[in-house]
Image (cartoon, rainbow, N blue to C red):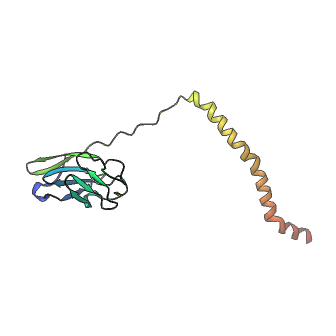
Amino acid sequence: MLPVCRIEDLPSGESVRLDTTPPVAVFNADGELYAVDDTCSHQDASLSEGWLEGCLVECPLHAATFDLRTGEPTCLPARRAVRTHRVSVVDGTIHVHLTEPAAVPMPARTPVAATTPATVTASAAVTAPVAAVAPATATTSAAAALGPLAAEDSAA
Ligand code: FES
């Protein structure tokens, strides 16, 4: 539970930004308090610097709007929701209850025995043509670079 400010310090239509990681914006939308991640899901703009209209906040950079009740964008260019956080008022002080970050699923692991032969075969197939071309390219480049020198050496 993170204290924000006194309720009288956040009048209707105003917002405050918390320097948490990630930053959180707290809004007083017509007397209802909402908290969402402050960074727009489209690019790097601060939603606490946007414009409130009812329970919608408009991003100040490209004008996507977000529903503060759900965090969902209501128009483009934003496509992803911002995280919402629960807000409470205790003894006249606004508090934010930070939502845990969404769990990032680990990539599925394939048994080693099943992938090893395929990986070796693919690597050999890719490496073979490069190995055959590389000496020819190096020889051609060296001959081109040393050509005039080789001619001077034989003249001297
Ligand atoms: S940064 Fe918010 S809409 Fe583009």
Q: Residue 103 occupies which quadrant of the picture?
A: top left
Q: Position of residue 126 (x, y in %)?
A: 68, 42
Q: Position of residue 26 (x, y in %)?
A: 21, 53
Q: Is residue 39 above or below residue 150?
A: above
Image quarter in which the C terminus is found: bottom right
Query: Could you tell me which residue is drawn at 26 percent across and 60 percent down?
Result: 50
Residue farthest front in this picture: 75
Query: Could you tell me which residue is drawn at 31 percent across and 59 percent down?
Result: 63
Q: Is residue 86 above or below residue 153?
A: above
Q: Is residue 46 above or below residue 114?
A: below
Q: Residue 61 occupies which quadrant of the picture?
A: bottom left
**Foreground residue among 120 and 16:** 16
Q: Position of residue 143 (x, y in %)?
A: 82, 61
Q: How many marks?
A: 0
Query: Could you tell me which residue is drawn at 63 percent across and 32 percent down?
Result: 118
Q: Position of residue 17 (x, y in %)?
A: 24, 57
**Foreground residue among 41 and 63:** 63
Image quarter in which the N terminus is found: top left
